[in-house]
Image: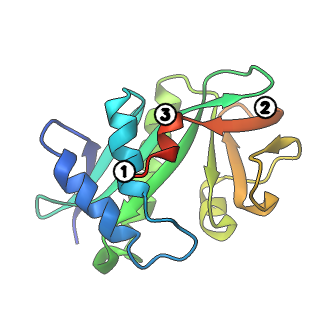
Amino acid sequence: MNIEVSNEKSGDELKIHQVTEQAFLSAPYTDHTEHFIVDALRGAGALTISQVAKADGEIIGHVAISPVTLSGGTTDWFGLGPISVLPEYQGCGVGSKLMKSSLAALEAIGASGCVVLGDPGYYGRFGFKVVDGLVYPGVPAEYFQALSFSDEFPQGEVSYHEAFSAQG
């Protein structure tokens, strides 16, 4: 299967919404608001990186990266997610392509690093790791990880954009 990754373009919004909704439909540990979060990030102008994966010209995956705030005042850090792949394409390398492409794009714009909330076994493959002193309150520490583009990590509490509270 030939998978192409590119930046979101005008007209992709509805399909991204549908892909994101379907990707998390049967997922555990979610309140099924990921598609609303992406819409709210876009509406707030907070989608720093928004890339789609296509197979045969059809969108089958999406990744969103948006700014985060750190209590210590460190800037130029971002949060990855949601990352979505249609269920029938999960496990086929689509998510890996989206991860590598979006992280390269993030580094290219001069970001200091990226945080993610998710499976350490999956995200660890891309260099994410738990960092002592960098926390996201209310979640088990092993599920909150960071990737630095300079090997320097900030300290403090991380807050995601207010769009992450979108409910519909």
Q: Position of residue 11 (x, y in %)?
A: 12, 41
In the rendered structure, are the residues bearing label 1 and label 2 in contact, judged by CB atoms less than 8 Å apart?
Answer: no
Residue 29 against residue 162 in the figure, above or below? below
Is tag 1's residue or tag 2's residue first in the polypeptide sequence? 1
Residue 36 tag number: 1
Residue type indicated by callout 3: Leu
Q: Which residue is mark 3?
A: 106
In the rendered structure, are the residues bearing label 3 and label 2 in contact, judged by CB atoms less than 8 Å apart?
Answer: no
- Neighbourhood count class around disc 3 (C-alpha, 10 Å): few under 14, some 14–19, many 20 upward: many
- Neighbourhood count class around disc 1 (C-alpha, 10 Å): few under 14, some 14–19, many 20 upward: some
- Neighbourhood count class around disc 2 (C-alpha, 10 Å): few under 14, some 14–19, many 20 upward: few
The residues bearing labels 1 and 3 have C-alpha atoms spaced at a distance of 23 Å
Q: Position of residue 39 (x, y in %)?
A: 32, 43
* Between 106 and 41, the one nearer to me in the picture: 41
Residue type indicated by callout 2: Glu
Mark toward the viewer: 1 or 2: 1
Residue 110 against residue 132 in the figure, above or below? above
Q: Residue at x 71, y 31 (%)?
A: 150
* Between 159 and 120, the one nearer to me in the picture: 159
Residue 152 tag number: 2
Indicate left or right for 11 with 162 as reference: left
The residues bearing labels 1 and 2 have C-alpha atoms spaced at a distance of 33 Å
Q: Residue at x 44, y 46 (%)?
A: 166
* Between 19 and 121, the one nearer to me in the picture: 19
Is tag 3's residue or tag 2's residue first in the polypeptide sequence? 3
Residue type indicated by callout 1: Phe
